[in-house]
Image: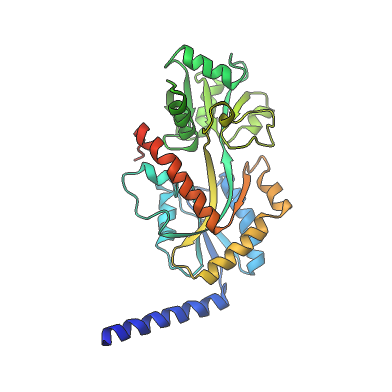
Amino acid sequence: MRLLRNALILTVCALSGFAALSQTYPSQPIKLVMPFAPGTNAEVALRTIAERLGNALKQPVLIENRPGAGSTLGADLVAKAAPDGYTLAATFNSSIAPGPLMYAKIPYDPLKDFHHIALVGVYPQYVIVKTDHPAKTMRDLLAMVKAKPGTVNYASAGVGTSGFLAAELLKQTLGLDMTHIPYKGPAPAISDLLGGRLDMVLTASATALVKAGKVRVLAVTSDKRVAAFPDVPTLDEIAPGVQAVSWLGISAPAQTPRAITSMLEKELLAILNTPDMQARLSDPVVGLSPMVLGSDKFVEFIQKEIRVWSPVIKVGNIRVE
């Protein structure tokens, strides 16, 4: 009985402490962990959001870069952080879904160890070819693949990336035989494309290259056509069901008090849904397609990503070390 009474007292004290915390929150700067190195377009988006959120909460929101292990290092840090609302995570497909499905083991549960607060938007991948490539459309390129199995090559920023997964889903859906050449990022892949050593590249960065007249976009991997290329079809229009995007969200440790996560969700949705913010995020420098979802819908989105990609990853025997 004494042990039970002591446990109840500790529980009441903890709940009382959290209640008091939520009433005074925030009383100090908030850390937003970015699981990639500085300089990405996602960080540009995050800094814009962090500035607005800091103004709304009257406390600075500071970006802390913690790259490593394909973005799972930063996610793990937040999963194990104190659930007090002062450590948040920029969460991505690579750290939450489908990324963890490709690892033999990760140190956190992508759903149970986080309170996913809001989805910010998605980064579609673009299928690009050199402007003098004989394939003028995506259908032309697919016809080439079918006519000469195994001879058409394509590059992505690496095994497990959204570009790689989009191509893998396309191959499985249409029964294609294409040769994948993995790179350690988009820049060297695009360099080899322009040098004539690749047939196509799947990348989230295409606008500047198109404007420079160096590449042609054949298709986009999102569920809808993008404003920057309204005449470019989605892969889904050509091969129904083939969609693959990178995404950006904001999450907190799982046990963060609901009063705090609700406050953050309310402020984030108000910020993200303004026309000015949506325009800034969809600017070519950032390259994000706004897709704002609150906590419940964000979790449903993650669960759908898991359902869609689990069989693709299993059939393709895709593993990331």
Q: Position of residue 41 (x, y in %)?
A: 59, 44
Above or below residue 155? Residue 58 is: below
The image position of residue 261, as x and y in percent, is 54, 66
Q: Nearer the viewer, residue 166 or 85?
A: 166
Colour scheme employed for the rendering of this structure: rainbow
Q: Image quarter for residue 124?
A: top right
Specify whether 80 is left or right of 31.
left
Q: Residue furthest front?
A: 240
Q: Nearer the viewer, residue 129 or 223?
A: 223
**Residue at 60% over, 65% down:** 60
- Judged left or right of residue 172, residue 190 is right
The quarter of the image holding the C terminus is top left
The quadrant of the rendering that contains the N terminus is bottom left
| Residue furthest out toward the right | 276
Above/below status of 35 relative to 287: below
Q: Is residue 157 visible?
A: no
Q: State the residue in front, 260 or 85.
A: 260
- Give the image quarter of residue 172: top left
In percent of width and height, residue 310 lies at 40, 41
Q: Is residue 18 something one can see in this rendering? A: yes
Measured as percent of width and height from the top left, residue 302 is found at 48, 49
Question: Is residue 139 shown left or right of residue 168?
Answer: right
Q: Which residue corresponds to the image point at 50% horizontal and 28% vertical from the top-left?
A: 189
User: From the viewer's perspective, is residue 285 above or below residue 207?
Assistant: below
In the displayed structure, would residue 65 be above or below residue 58?
above
